[in-house]
Image: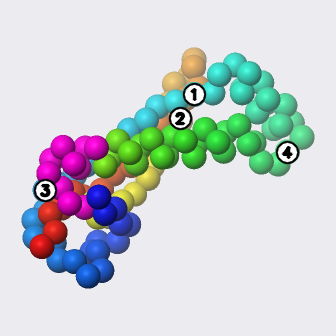
Amino acid sequence: MLVATTENIAGHKTKQVIGQVFGLVVRSRGLGGNIMAGLRSIVGGEIHEYTKLMAESREQALDRLIEHAQSLGADAVIGLRFDATEAGAQTPATEVLAYGTAVKLA
Protein backbone atom coordinates (compact mmCIF):
# COMPACT_ATOMS: atom_id res chain seq x y z
CA MET A 1 0.00 0.00 0.00
CA LEU A 2 1.48 3.30 -1.08
CA VAL A 3 0.75 6.18 1.30
CA ALA A 4 1.73 9.75 0.48
CA THR A 5 1.20 13.19 1.95
CA THR A 6 1.08 14.59 -1.58
CA GLU A 7 -1.96 14.73 -3.86
CA ASN A 8 -0.24 12.53 -6.46
CA ILE A 9 2.22 9.66 -6.33
CA ALA A 10 5.26 10.15 -8.58
CA GLY A 11 5.32 7.70 -11.46
CA HIS A 12 1.67 6.72 -11.02
CA LYS A 13 -1.62 8.02 -12.35
CA THR A 14 -4.80 7.98 -10.30
CA LYS A 15 -7.38 5.84 -12.09
CA GLN A 16 -10.19 6.12 -9.53
CA VAL A 17 -10.86 8.06 -6.33
CA ILE A 18 -12.53 5.72 -3.84
CA GLY A 19 -13.06 8.22 -1.04
CA GLN A 20 -12.02 9.25 2.44
CA VAL A 21 -10.33 6.77 4.74
CA PHE A 22 -9.22 7.14 8.32
CA GLY A 23 -7.60 5.42 11.26
CA LEU A 24 -8.49 6.51 14.79
CA VAL A 25 -6.82 5.73 18.13
CA VAL A 26 -7.68 7.04 21.60
CA ARG A 27 -5.08 6.25 24.26
CA SER A 28 -3.96 7.39 27.68
CA ARG A 29 -0.95 6.74 29.87
CA GLY A 30 -1.24 4.47 32.85
CA LEU A 31 -0.96 5.87 36.37
CA GLY A 32 2.80 5.21 36.54
CA GLY A 33 3.43 7.03 33.27
CA ASN A 34 1.31 9.98 34.35
CA ILE A 35 3.21 10.28 37.64
CA MET A 36 6.58 10.21 35.84
CA ALA A 37 5.35 12.72 33.27
CA GLY A 38 4.09 14.98 36.06
CA LEU A 39 7.48 14.89 37.76
CA ARG A 40 9.28 15.64 34.48
CA SER A 41 6.98 18.61 33.81
CA ILE A 42 8.12 20.19 37.10
CA VAL A 43 11.77 20.05 36.01
CA GLY A 44 11.10 20.87 32.36
CA GLY A 45 12.31 19.29 29.15
CA GLU A 46 10.96 16.52 26.98
CA ILE A 47 8.39 14.20 28.54
CA HIS A 48 9.60 10.88 27.13
CA GLU A 49 6.53 8.95 28.35
CA TYR A 50 4.22 11.13 26.25
CA THR A 51 6.58 11.19 23.27
CA LYS A 52 6.53 7.39 23.19
CA LEU A 53 2.74 7.30 23.62
CA MET A 54 2.20 9.70 20.70
CA ALA A 55 4.63 7.85 18.40
CA GLU A 56 2.88 4.53 19.12
CA SER A 57 -0.55 6.11 18.66
CA ARG A 58 0.43 7.65 15.34
CA GLU A 59 1.76 4.31 14.08
CA GLN A 60 -1.42 2.50 15.14
CA ALA A 61 -3.63 5.15 13.51
CA LEU A 62 -1.65 4.77 10.26
CA ASP A 63 -2.01 0.97 10.39
CA ARG A 64 -5.79 1.36 10.82
CA LEU A 65 -5.97 3.84 7.92
CA ILE A 66 -4.18 1.31 5.68
CA GLU A 67 -6.56 -1.48 6.79
CA HIS A 68 -9.53 0.77 5.98
CA ALA A 69 -8.14 1.60 2.52
CA GLN A 70 -7.41 -2.06 1.77
CA SER A 71 -10.94 -3.05 2.78
CA LEU A 72 -12.23 -0.66 0.11
CA GLY A 73 -9.92 -2.12 -2.56
CA ALA A 74 -7.53 0.84 -2.72
CA ASP A 75 -3.99 0.65 -4.10
CA ALA A 76 -2.85 3.82 -2.35
CA VAL A 77 -3.77 6.67 -0.02
CA ILE A 78 -2.98 10.24 -1.02
CA GLY A 79 -3.16 13.45 0.98
CA LEU A 80 -2.26 11.73 4.27
CA ARG A 81 -2.68 13.97 7.33
CA PHE A 82 -2.58 13.48 11.08
CA ASP A 83 -4.57 15.27 13.75
CA ALA A 84 -4.36 14.95 17.53
CA THR A 85 -6.82 16.15 20.16
CA GLU A 86 -7.06 15.88 23.91
CA ALA A 87 -10.17 13.90 24.84
CA GLY A 88 -11.85 13.35 28.20
CA ALA A 89 -11.79 15.58 31.25
CA GLN A 90 -12.01 12.92 33.97
CA THR A 91 -9.67 10.45 32.30
CA PRO A 92 -7.16 12.36 30.16
CA ALA A 93 -6.58 10.72 26.80
CA THR A 94 -5.31 11.68 23.39
CA GLU A 95 -7.14 11.02 20.14
CA VAL A 96 -4.90 10.54 17.10
CA LEU A 97 -6.52 10.55 13.67
CA ALA A 98 -4.84 9.62 10.39
CA TYR A 99 -6.87 10.50 7.29
CA GLY A 100 -6.52 10.72 3.55
CA THR A 101 -8.07 9.75 0.23
CA ALA A 102 -8.11 6.15 -0.96
CA VAL A 103 -7.41 5.70 -4.68
CA LYS A 104 -6.85 3.06 -7.33
CA LEU A 105 -3.76 3.57 -9.46
CA ALA A 106 -3.46 3.05 -13.20
**Which disc, if any, is residue 94?**
2
Quarter of the rendering containing residue 18? bottom left
Mark 4 or mark 3: which comes first in sequence?
3
Residue at the spot of label 4? 44
Mark 3 or mark 2: which comes first in sequence?
3
- State the residue at coordinates (30%, 80%): 10
Quarter of the rendering containing residue 51? top right
Residue type at tag 3:
Ile
Q: 89 left or right of 44?
A: left
Label 2 sits on a secondary structure element that is strand
- Spot occupied by residue 87 in the image (x, y as percentages of width and height): 50, 30
Q: 56 left or right of 41?
A: left
Q: 71 left or right of 100?
A: left
Label 1 sits on a secondary structure element that is loop
Residue at the spot of label 3? 18
User: What distance separates the C-alpha of mark 1 from that of mark 2?
Assistant: 6 Å
Label 4 sits on a secondary structure element that is loop
